[in-house]
Amino acid sequence: MELTSKTQDEAVRESIAADCTQLIDQQVSAKTGLSGLALKATYGVVKGIGADYVPGAIKRLLPETCAALDPIWAEGLQKGDPVAHLSQNKERTADLILSATDTRIANSGGGLIKASYNKLRKSVKGDVTAAVPELAQILSKHAR
C-alpha cells in the first residue's frame, strides 16, 4: 500500500512519469542489433502518437503497477532497503510490472498500441528486468 498511497499525488505521478520516460528513452537508445532496431522503430511509432503519450501512459499505468509492486516493496521495507530488495529480486519485480501492463493492454480496445505491445511483449522482459534497479531508485526517490 506504500507505493500506491504515495502515488496518489498528481505531482508525484508527474515526476515518476518523467523519470521513467527518461529511463525508457535511455534503455531504448542503448539497444543494438536487429532486435534493437525493431524496438527503436516500434518505440518511435509510439512516441510519434504525441510527445506526451509515453509519460501519459506511465501515469495511467502507475496505479496498477504500484499496487502490483506494493507487496515486494513492503518486504523490502521490512528488510530495511526496498531498493536493494527489488534489485535483488529483479525477475520477480519485472514479472509483477509486466503482469500489470498485460492486464491493462488486455482490457484496452486494441489498435496500434496493443498490436505493438503484443508484438514485442516476449522480448521485453529482459529489458524490464535490466531496468529494475533504476526503477527502484526512481520509486524510492518519490516514495519518501
Image (cartoon, rainbow, N blue to C red):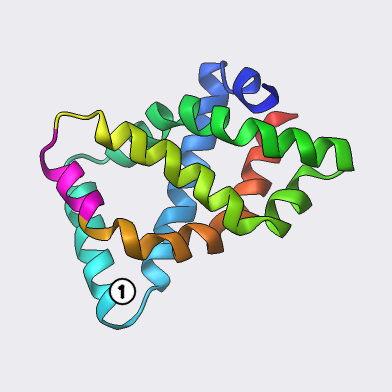
Image check: 92 left or right of 41? right
Instruction: Identify which residue, 127 or 122, lies in the foreground.
Output: 122
Instruction: Report if residue 52 is visible in the image.
Output: no
Label 1, residues with CA under 10 Å away: few <14, some 14-19, many ≥20: some
Image quarter (top left, top right, bottom left or bottom right) of the N terminus: top right
Q: Residue at x 42, y 72 (%)?
A: 30
Q: Position of residue 19 (x, y in %)?
A: 52, 44
Give the residue at mark 1. Answer: 36
Q: Position of residue 60 (x, y in %)?
A: 38, 27
Q: Position of residue 117 (x, y in %)?
A: 25, 50
Image quarter (top left, top right, bottom left or bottom right) of the C terminus: top right
| Magenta stretch, overall SS | helix
Instruction: Report if residue 53 is visible in the image.
Output: yes
Q: Position of residue 118 (x, y in %)?
A: 23, 51
Image check: 7 left or right of 54? right
Q: Amino acid at mark 1?
A: Gly
The correct choice, above or below, for 128 with respect to 39 in the image is above
Image check: 31 left or right of 4? left
Q: Residue furthest bottom?
A: 33
Q: Residue at x 64, y 27 (%)?
A: 3
The correct choice, above or below, for 50 with respect to 92 in the image is above
Q: Residue at x 47, y 36 (%)?
A: 17
**Residue 112 lies within the magenta run:** yes
Q: Residue at x 28, y 75 (%)?
A: 35
Range drawn in magenta: 110-118
**Residue 15 lies within the magenta run:** no
The correct choice, above or below, for 123 with respect to 90 in the image is below
Q: Label 1's element?
A: helix
Instruction: Identify which residue, 99 or 133, lies in the foreground.
Output: 99
